[in-house]
Amino acid sequence: MHAQHPTPLYTTAALREVETLAQAAIARDGGLPLMERAGQAAAEAALGMLGDPGGSVLVLAGPGNNGGDALVAARRLRAAFVPVDVVLDADPGRLPPDARAAFDAWIAAGGTVHEAIPSDGRWPLVIDGLFGIGLKRPPSGLFAERIEAIARLAARGSQVLALDVPSGLDADTGQAQGRAVEATRTLTFLALKPGLLTADGPDHCGALALADLGVDVPALRPPSGHALDARQLDGLRPPRRRNSHKGSHGSVGVIGGAPGMVGAALLAGRAALLAGAGRVILGLVDEQGPVVDPLQPELMLRRWHELPRLDALTTLAVGPGLGDLPESHAALGWALASALPLVVDADGLNLVARDAGLRAALAARPAPTVLTPHPAEAARLLGIGTDAVQADRIGSATALASMFRAGVVLKGQGSVTALPDGQWFIHRTGNPGMASAGMGDVLTGLVASLLAQGVHLPVALTGAVTLHGAAGDAVSAGHGVPEGLAGLTASEVALRCRLLLARGGKAR
């Protein structure tokens, strides 16, 4: 996971610091102001979207610096002989200084502004410059009407270019604040923002592009977090010496499989084997469960109470299909008390959320621990509503990591992983086709397998989440549906994980 550097992510507060430092450096060196650079980048993106034969552009400019970027873009497009209609929803006299300068330059270049969107206009492209990164409440009044107008124009065939962030989207959390612009393309400035990659962000951004405006942002301030994609898979697969055997590559114990839910444990165990664990032993809660997996006979099937007598286990995973029986509680209690690296998922998390003793045991574990909640499970652990978790996915993941001194992956669109030291990551692999039963069980098996093979927790966790999503993407793309194959199964994803690990993440 070190062959490619992860992509820096910056929160709004961090970007405010970066902007201040960059503007000071530009003033010292006499370079082109950031707003001029952003507007030029936006104009170039607009020209690319217009293509040939081109056409006119509607520019919607708001009351802040995002509106100033849009005004610069309008001036640059006009200079390129592109017909431009500008609607300015602000009092020019109350614009911030840089945006006011952009307005004055637009007027000096012969431009005009409309107070309303011309009713008879037809524009192949609309530029959304209403709001930037600072919006924290739903747009209302005139601005809500503008967003609705953009949606109507898009429905009639207009492309939409959002500047920095689609208006109405929270740049930090990815929450759509009421109605938000759904862009064809988003050109974001200086650095990627977490809200573009998680929660509602990807549904509103369209194709996402970054214009760094010639600023070395990490040199001015360390990133708030990082984004990971399939490039980070190179080097994830642990190297193997020729002189090795199954015991050299770890033994995973999977505890789960209550009556009616044995399949969850089987999926986790199969994934652990496919990801390279030397052997995998399932400890089933169901006393009447199968004794062999006919599709994966390499798995060793036992009853859960047999696992404590085994001395060869190197990692545990507990939760897939665990249920809520007395045996489930006993199995989870033993797993939490063990000195082995542990992955807790599904019913394991739900039992912890309801039992103060189990919560204390989880938080007190000295061994490496990973939690893999979906939003509802995270909400139960945090004692809040699922909507509150989704409203701040990064905050929720980091809170859990701190609370339980564990690595955490908050699953969902733009899965967030967090570490106890405060580091967090957003994963750019995965697609909506993966919203199907068993996917979480496969992920649990992947994490456990990498831990068993000696991969350190931060890399095992982030690597498994990235691998899981990349495999789903590869299967979907192989069927000609790169946006996500409906009907994609967890078993298909597990099989592709093995291939991606062997190829260093390359989907060829």
Image (cartoon, grey):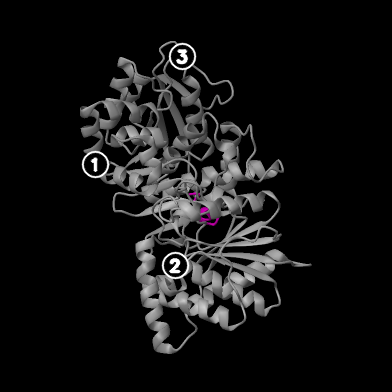
Quadrant position of residue 389: top left
Residue 465 drawn above or below residue 435: below
Question: Which residue extends farthest right?
Answer: 53
Residue 80 in view of the camera: yes
Q: Nearer the viewer, mark 2 or mark 1?
A: 2
Q: Nearer the viewer, residue 505 or 348?
A: 348
On the image, the x and y values in percent for residue 234 come to 53, 55
On the image, the x and y values in percent for residue 120 come to 70, 59
For residue 354, side relative to residue 455 (left or right) = left
Q: Which residue corresponds to mark 1?
A: 366
Q: In whole angstroms, how far apart are the C-alphas of marks 2 and 1?
A: 50 Å
Q: In whole angstroms, how far apart are the C-alphas of marks 3 and 2?
A: 63 Å
The residue stretch that appears in magenta: 230-238
Three-letter amino acid code at disc 2? Answer: Gly
> Secondary structure beneath disc 3?
loop
Q: Is residue 235 magenta?
A: yes
Mark drawn on residue 42: none
Three-letter amino acid code at disc 1? Answer: Pro
Instruction: Give the residue drawn at x 56%, y 64%.
Output: 115
Instruction: Give the residue drawn at x 44%, y 48%.
Output: 175
> Secondary structure beneath disc 1?
loop
Q: Which residue corresponds to mark 2?
A: 64
